[in-house]
Structure formats: structure tokens, C-alpha cells
Image (cartoon, grey):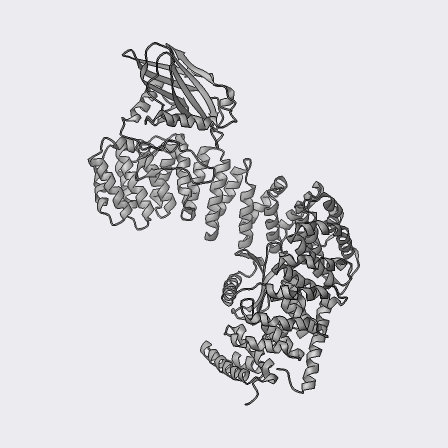
Amino acid sequence: MPAPIRLRELIRTIRTARTQAEEREMIQKECAAIRSSFREEDNTYRCRNVAKLLYMHMLGYPAHFGQLECLKLIASQKFTDKRIGYLGAMLLLDERQDVHLLMTNCIKNDLNHSTQYVQGLALCTLGCMGSSEMCRDLAGEVEKLLKTSNSYLRKKAALCAVHVIRKVPELMEMFLPATKNLLSEKNHGVLHTSVVLLTEMCERSPDMLAHFRKLVPQLVRILKNLIMSGYSPEHDVSGISDPFLQVRILRLLRILGKSDDDSSEAMNDILAQVATNTETSKNVGNAILYETVLTIMDIKSESGLRVLAINILGRFLLNNDKNIRYVALTSLLKTVQTDHNAVQRHRSTIVDCLKDLDVSIKRRAMELSFALVNGNNIRGMMKELLYFLDSCDPEFKADCASGVFLAAEKYAPSKRWHIDTIMRVLTTAGSYVRDDSVPNLIQLITNSVEMHAYTVQRLYKALLDDISQQPLVQVASWCIGEYGDLLVSGQCEEEEPIQVTEDEVLDVLEGLLVSNLSAAVTRGYSLTAIMKLSTRFSGVNRIKKVVSIYGSSIDVELQQRAVEYNALFKKYDHMRPALLERMPIMEKSASNGPTEIVQTNGETEPSVVDSKHPPPVSQPANQANDLLDLLGGNDVVPVIQTTVPTKPASAGGELLDLLGDLSLTIPPMTAYNKNGLKIDFTFERANPNPNVAVITIHASNSTEADMTDFVFQAAVPKTFQLQLLSPSSNVVPALNQGTVTQVIRVLNPQKQQLRMRIKLTYTLKGSPVQDLAEVNNFPPQSWQ
Amino acid sequence: MMRFLLLFSRQGKLRLQKWFTPLTDREKKKVIRDVMALVLARPPRSCNFLHWRDIKVVYKRYASLYFCTGLEDQDNELLTLEVLHRYVELLDKYFGNVCELDIIFNFEKAYYILDEFLMGGEVLETSKVAVSVSMENADTLQETMEEYMNRPAF
């Protein structure tokens, strides 16, 4: 059989192939030849064949039939064979192959070979891809070589030990004695690999960390020598002596100095020296400075040093080199939590980086900008971030939008600003906002009672422009459904009111239902909105028609909704207004999580503690309007009231939970005391929202007769929001035999002085009694 | 530590692959595909770092070849640029004005040089001279056998 072709020959031939098919043919032919050659157990050319196989493997072709051949090569006595054999093992064999373990014996023999280059091959292979079993078997040999005086072998043994420890951490103890005088080596290769080994051990074991802390002075000395020593041609990189070793030492110092005062102090000087003396014109110097900064920030350094570090990062930010700017932004992101004020000083530079052309830098700058937003800079920062949102790539928009929402929620200076910001995000990046932002936004809008007219108007205008962005459309249709009456009434304090007719509004909503751009969820929203408008608009017929049409829609969800709404019109018309009334203020369960909006099929339910379905009841809307008329108007907001009487037990249950909070220290007060009716207020703070004061009224009756049909109503100034929960009963028993309790929740975000007007109605001895009063004597702790 | 080192051409042809963690062939192919796509898509004057999964990818282009490596969180990206540069210098010293063709036709030598410079994802030897000397000596060992056998190794 002719000798197999040479490797270079094969490479040359394959490269002449003009098509993939041609190449495949050549490869297949050669593979067949190689396979038959392997079968003949030819020692002479095995090396050549495996080399060719490795080339073909790199091109992407299967080469598993060469695995055993690699083992044979490793076992051969020729150095050339071993070299290719080990290379083949590293490329073709990995832990998952059974064949892998067969190497163990060969490697063991080679670790004890007389030629250091053979030992080196064995160490290299073990250190790159040795499995746990192999590492366990051969750890002893590695440990022996770690103590040799041959620096070529010692450095390889050190990195091999690192691999062994990574694979089998329990073996770490075994290498401890050998590390004793590793750092007294002069050879940089050994020094470097020793530092890597020490780093690995310290990272994995707190005991080792404590043990090696005593090496800090030695490490500092070595680093000092590197910096102070003159030019060393062997290790020089652009005027800096062995930057690789310097950086590794700095990294080890970082681990040793973390949370340890003494070690941190011992390295203070050298860190300052490196930070000030390193040449920054080339990448090398900056690499060392970068590592130094990371070390300074992690250990217990003195404040002067920390400021120096942040200033270095600030200078990095202004560097022309993109890599350095990127690295600076990444580091600042890590330190922004701990050294917030120092990083704030560089805010304008960071914001400028938002306009950088480089994608990686933009992303880092965006993350850092969000971390820097606080109550003071919110307006300015938000302007920049919204501008960024307008112009950035789509890959950023989702994250940026979420970030804007979060920041706006935490630091919004006013409700109007908050809503404007949200509108801006929805209109510019509406299709990229996360799904859970829709309920969050709805909740926010509901709670900004005074902004309802403004909000619905702006949302309506936005819908007229563009109905393709689903989150925007969903929020808008929900708002129109809720506040459609405000929209057509043309009242708007904040802006020029627009003139819209009921038909125009219904046109828009129906348009959403039929448009191809609307998602199924969006259609559901708009159908529900249309339904809600049946109680807010005068013309109901059109709505009835729409609803009945969709009763036969193919979309099951729409169909169900339409059928149920139809049923409302036909059989439960008297319930319709109650079910479709305005949503109450919703409590947030957590500041960032999804809210407790409970809205199923258009029925409204109170979202707080009470979770029972409202049975048919007379219209509370009238009562609210009553209060308005009586108390004359503009500075008082009608209370949103639930009128479901529940069992006293549940009210008692509420009371119990509230009293469980031990942090209350607000004294109770008497709000009203006239004609035998006394009303006391007791206070708690609601958890988790400290802006909500929870007031429980206790009504007691000292007259001889019961007070029946007792109703308590309250109204608060504009800056507050009020929610009245259900009373324990409607009868105040005579002669102080019992009390009626009712819970009021007052949201007081601006911490203004609490004032309240109350209206009491009851029947005493057959005649109705009505009284109004103002309550001004709230204790300061209740609203501060 | 470095997780992998890849050399590939502008046309997406792989010239060298070194893996420092155990991965299946399939996983390796996926990494190569993804990282290559990301790196080749970068505009010319971008920053040399990007983020992929939980790995920091550092790449540098030398003539027609991309040198690309994946780092873990603690590793220093700027220093890794120096590591890549050092490897190129070592290849250059060995082959004399190295070009892509040298690496194609002598890929096994490129691997040997790499194995004298890096091991287990960490730098093994920081001295250029030391690496060159080791390579020379090992090659001599090989040639001695060749002369003895009186025929070319492969």
C-alpha cells in the first residue's frame, strides 16, 4: 500500500476544492484511506494519519474513529508521536468518553519520564482536560512535581494543581505543604502560576484564606520590586515589567484584603504607589490600573484611596479608547452602591456615554444611569433617558422602558410628571414594554384621582394617532372605559379640553375591536371598555348592538364576555350600574410587584381585604353625589365606598390583624360626640405602605334606644384619597351595649395635615337624624 | 480563567479551537456558531468586549484572523487583550512574520506554542524568551527522532 499522503499535501489539496461537495468528497476518500491504515496497525504512519484527522476535525468533520489511535500514539516512545497523540487527546477526547480513562496510566508513566518535555506534555493534558477520576488518581504525582526544583515543571505542576482543585476540591489540603516556599521563587513563570494556585485555594476555602493572609507582606514586596526594578527585557511589555504577574498579585491581594483591616492596611501604600505611578499611555498600564481600582474598592481601604480610585475611573471615562471607557462604566456599576456620592460626580460624563456609537458602551451607560437616578436629579436624568429611549436600538428598548418606569415610580416629583413620562414611554416604545407594566400603569392612573380627565384625554389623543402599540392601546382603552364620561364632558384642568362626542369615542373603541393590529387581549380590553361606557354614556343602544354582535365571535374569550354582558342588559339591568361603577383605589401589595387588581369579566370587586362578591345593592353613586352637593364641591373628593355589609367577624378580623402591628403609638381621639352618639377614631399604620393611615371608627350610643340604619360617611381634601370599608353593622345598640366599627383608609402621600368632614345618618325612635361635622383634631402622628 | 480560545477568519472558517472546560461536541459547535456570529457582526471601530450569556467575550482582529476568547466574571479584560497580543507575538517570533497561511498549514505548531503559553485557561509563562526556548528544545527533540528515523515525521 502506498504511503499515506503527507499532512501539508492534504491541506493543500483540500484547499483547492471549489465547493463544499468537492471538499466533502476529498475528505471522505482520505478518511477511508486513514481508516484502512489504522486497521493495518501501522506504527510508522499513525502519527501522520492522526495529524490529518485532526485537521479534518477542525473543518468540522467527524473524527471519533481516531480516538483509540491517539492513545496508541501517547503510549509510543517517540516524542513526535506523543506530541500529536496528546494534542489529539485534548481535541478529540473529553471526560464523557470512556476511552478517556485509558489515558490515565500513560499519563502516569509520562509524568515520571526522564525528559521534561514529555512530563510537560502529560501535565498539560491533565491540566487542561483531566476528569475528576484522573485527577484523583494522579494528584499525588502532581504534588510531587510541584516540589521539584525544575522551574519548567514546577510552573506546569502549579497550574495542573489548579485544575485538580477545580475538579476535586477536597484534594486542596494535599497541596498545602508544597506551597510553602512557592513565593520565594525567582522564576516569573513559577511565581505567576503560584499566585494563580494561591488565588484558587483562597477563593475556595476560608481556612486557606486565613492561612495565607500572612503572605501579604511578601506579595507586597514582590509587587514593589516589579514596579521599582529597572528595565527587564525578558518580561517587559511597553515599559512595564511583567504586567501579567502584577495583575495577578493585585487580584490575590484583593481577596486577602477583603474584610480584613490589617491586610488592607499593609497594602495601602503599594496600591497608592501603583495607582499613581503607572504609565497610562498604553493599554498595559490601564490594565494594571483597572485591577488596582477593583482591588481598592473591594478591600477596607482608607477614604483617600477610594477617592483616588473613583477619580481614576472618571479619567478612564474621558479616555479616547473605547475599551477603557467600557471597563470604567462596568467598574462604576459595581461601585455605585457603595460609593454612590463619588460616582454621582461623574454623572454628566456617564450620561454623555449614552450617545456613544458603541453598543456595549451604550448598554453599560444605560444601566449605570438608572443606578444614579435619585430624587434630586430625576427630571434632568429622565429627559436624557427618554431621549435615549427614542433613539436607541430595539434591543435596548425593553430594558430602558422598564428602567424608566421603575425610576419614575420611585422618584416622581409630581403625579402629572409621572403620567406624562409614562405616556411618553408608551408612545415611543409602546410595543417593547413588559406585560406586567400594563396593570401597574392602570393602578397608578386609578390612584391619581385628580389626573383622570387629563390622562384619559391624552390617551385618547394618542389612540387617534397610533393603535399598533398594544400596551398603549390596552391602557388607553381601559381608561376610556373608566373615565369616558370625563372625556366627553370636556372638562380638563391641566390642558385644553378637547371636544369629543360619545359616538366618536365608540368609533375608536369599535375600531380597536376590528383592527388586525389588535391582539386578543387588547380586544378583550376594548369590549369591556365599551360595556363600561353603557353606564357613563347616554346612548346605550349602540353599545347593546356591539355587545350582541360579539356574542357570536370566534374568539372564545370575546364571546364569553359578550354573552355575559348581553345577559347583564337583558336580565340583570338593575345590577348593571353597580357592577360597572368606578374602580376603587387599589392598594399595592409591593412597590415593584404586580398589583392586586381584581377585574374579571368587567365586574368590579373591591381589591382590599374583603373578598366577597357584592350582592345586588342600591346605587352607591347617588350617595357619593349627595355628599358632594352637601359639602359643596371642589376641594373635596367624593368618597369611593363599598356598601357591602359583611359579618362583624370579618371586621373584627381586620381589627385583630391591625392590632398585631406593634409599631403603633398614635393615640385615639374622639371625632364626634353629640346627642348621645359618640364616634371615636383609633389609628394604625398600614403595612407596608407608610403613607396610608388606617383609621377605625367606633360608634357608640348612650341613649336609651337603638340607632338603626346607621350610615357613616366621610370626605377629605383633594390631596388625600379615602377608602371606606364596610361597617360591622347598621345598628348602634343603646346604652353603650356595643359599638359599630368601620375602617377608613387614608392615603396621604404628601404628608399634609389630615382633615375630614363626616356625615352621620341614623334613625332614632322612628325619626331620621342627620348631622354633619368637621374633624380637625387629628393627632400629628396620624399624618406625619 | 479563560473558558475557550478561538481563531477564525473573516469568512467564518475556524483555524484553531482550544477549550478549557469540558463540553460536548454539540455544545462546542453551538458556542463557535454563536460567538463567531456576534464577533463578525461587530462594526470596525467598536470596543473589543461584548457580553454573551454569562461570559465576557474579548476579541481582537489581526489582519485576516480574529482572536477570540471567553472570560469569567473576575478576569481582567484589558489584560486579556495583552494575552492575545502576546500569543500573536509568540507566533510571529516562531514563524517569522506570521500570516494566516502559516497557522493553516502548521496548526499543530500553533497548538504547541499555545500549550507553552497558556494552560487550564491561565497564563503559564510570562516570558517570551522562555516560551521560545521551550519550543526550540521540543522541536529539536522531534527532529532528532526524524533524523534518526531518516524520514519526515508527517
Q: Residue furthest bottom?
A: A1
Q: Is residue A713 above or below residue B94?
A: above
Closer to us: A524 or A119: A119
Q: Which quadrant holds the N terminus of chain A?
A: bottom right
How many numbered marks are there?
Answer: 0
Q: Residue at x 37, y 41 (%)?
A: A475
Task: Return the x and y of residue A738 as percentages of the image width and height.
Answer: 38, 17
Q: Residue at x 29, y 48 (%)?
A: A515
Task: Return the x and y of residue A760 as percentages of the image width and height.
Answer: 35, 17
Closer to us: A310 or A118: A118
Closer to us: A487 or A596: A596
Closer to us: A493 or A111: A111
Task: Return the x and y of residue A66 as percentages of the image width and height.
Answer: 54, 77
Q: Quadrant of residue A141?
A: bottom right
Q: Quadrant of residue A720?
A: top left
Q: Quadrant of residue A262?
A: top right
